Image: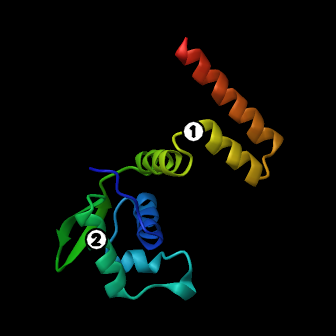
């Protein structure tokens, strides 16, 4: 699968599929995170077909419907997205990306300690 990224609506559908593992279109609609902003059935149906064409989703026939399921893990997509942002927004600079995140986000002492721990683990693995 090439480096394809998801639109915001596609990502909402994928997040539902990642959490539910598999779903019919009507189940995606029933579990939509913003009940007052649920897209129409045909819109969600079109989105899952697009996700299938992009290689993110597969389906099994279930009567006259299709049960959709993710073909890529959320973690794998997150890695792809972060790599894309780092390469295209920060010219491949991990330091630039992390610096920007730290400048734009309020980071708790607990989060900083966890980040330091991750850096220490990465250094230990590199030795």
Question: Where residue 50 is drawn, which disc sits there?
Answer: 2
Marks 1 and 2, Cα distance to the nearest angstrom? 32 Å
Colouring method of the image: rainbow
**Dot 2: element:** helix
Q: Can you identify the residue that label 1 sits on?
A: 93
Circle 1 or circle 2, nearest the eye: 1
Residue at the front extreme of this rendering: 91
User: Please, is residue 42 above or below residue 56 in the view?
Assistant: below
Closer to the chain start, of discs 1 and 2, is: 2
Callouts 1 and 2 close, C-beta under 8 Å: no
> For residue 33, what is the image quadrant?
bottom right
Is 111 displayed left or right of 86 in the figure? right
Residue plotted at (70% across, 42% down) = 99
**Dot 1: element:** loop
Q: Quadrant of the C terminus?
A: top right
The percent position of residue 53, horizontal first and vertical second, equals 23, 65
The percent position of residue 36, horizontal first and vertical second, equals 56, 88
Residue plotted at (45% across, 73% down) = 9
Residue plotted at (71% across, 34% down) = 114
- Relative depth, front residue between 87 and 112: 87
């Amino acid at each position: 699968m090439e480096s394809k990224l998801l639109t915001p609506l596609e990502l909402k559908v994928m997040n539902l599929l990642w959490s539910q593992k598999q779903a019919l279109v009507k189940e995606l609609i029933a579990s939509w995170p913003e009940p007052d902003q649920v897209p129409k059935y045909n819109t969600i149906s079109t989105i899952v077909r697009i996700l299938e064409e992009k290689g993110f989703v597969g389906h099994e026939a279930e009567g006259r419907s299709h049960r959709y399921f993710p073909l890529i893990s959320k973690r794998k997509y997150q890695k792809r997205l972060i790599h894309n942002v780092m390469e295209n927004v920060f010219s491949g600079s991990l330091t630039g990306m992390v610096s920007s995140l730290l400048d734009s986000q309020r980071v708790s002492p607990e989060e900083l300690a966890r980040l330091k721990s991750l850096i220490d683990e990465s250094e230990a693995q590199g030795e």
